[in-house]
Image: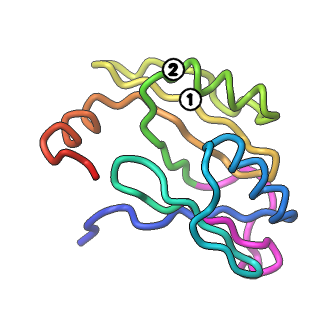
């Protein structure tokens, strides 16, 4: 059974530039850094956002936008989307009301990864019950 999100991994052709870009966006340095891989801990539960040098990607993996979208909860969705776009991300899906307070958007980062952001009332309810970190 799935128990919880541990690490989301993205690929980048230029790992140093991905580190610079995400450090600027997130406002923190990666907590783990080794040749070919960096990792940030973010959010209430310190989920891991990792970046792998694309040369280590499995054979046949996509080199452009493709696949699933992981959505990260944000408190101010329009502000976060505006910040991502100002840093050079490209809109993938605009801010979209999903009903009952759920609102999503997604962008493609400068490295070809789809980054989903979401205002999610359920997430806030869970954090309220557990207290987060």
Instruction: Establish if 126 lies above or below 48.
Output: above
Q: Observer-nearest residue: 20 or 80?
A: 20
Q: Earlier in the sequence, mark 1 or mark 2?
A: 2
Q: Observer-nearest residue: 30 or 128?
A: 30
Residue 98, given in percent of the width and then of the height, sits at 40, 22
- Tag on residue 76? none
- Give the SS element for disc 1: strand
Residue bearing mark 1: 105
Is residue 83 highlighted in magenta? no
In what quadrant of the picture does the N terminus appear? bottom left
Q: Quadrant of residue 17?
A: bottom right
Instruction: Establish if 6 lies above or below 80.
Output: below
- Give the SS element for disc 2: strand
- x 80%, y 53%: residue: 111
- x 62%, y 22%: residue: 94
- x 66%, y 46%: residue: 114
Which portion, as a residue range, is magenta? Answer: 49-67
- x 35%, y 47%: residue: 44
Q: Residue furthest left?
A: 129
Residue bearing mark 2: 96
Q: Local crowd at mark 2 within 10 Å, few (<14), some, or many (≥20)?
A: few
Q: Is residue 9 left or right of residue 102?
A: right
Residue 19, given in percent of the width and then of the height, sits at 75, 58
Q: CA distance from mark 1 to mark 2?
A: 6 Å
Q: How is the image coloured?
A: rainbow
Q: Say if mark 1 contacts mark 2, CB within 8 Å.
A: yes
Residue 107, given in percent of the width and then of the height, sits at 68, 36
Q: Observer-nearest residue: 100 or 84?
A: 84
Q: Observer-nearest residue: 17 or 52?
A: 17
Q: Is residue 132 left or right of residue 87?
A: left
């Amino acid at each position: 059974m799935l128990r919880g999100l541990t690490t989301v991994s993205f690929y980048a052709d230029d790992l140093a530039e991905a580190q610079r870009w995400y450090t600027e966006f997130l406002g923190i340095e990666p907590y783990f850094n080794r040749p070919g891989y960096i990792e940030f801990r973010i959010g209430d539960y310190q989920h891991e956002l990792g970046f792998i040098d694309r040369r280590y990607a499995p054979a046949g993996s996509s080199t452009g936008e493709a696949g699933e979208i992981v959505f990260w909860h944000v408190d101010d969705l329009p502000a976060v989307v505006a910040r991502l776009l100002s840093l050079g991300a490209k809109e993938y899906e605009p801010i979209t009301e999903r009903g009952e307070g759920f609102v999503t958007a997604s962008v493609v980062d400068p490295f070809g990864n789809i980054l989903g952001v979401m205002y999610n009332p359920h997430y806030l309810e869970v954090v309220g019950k557990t207290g987060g970190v």
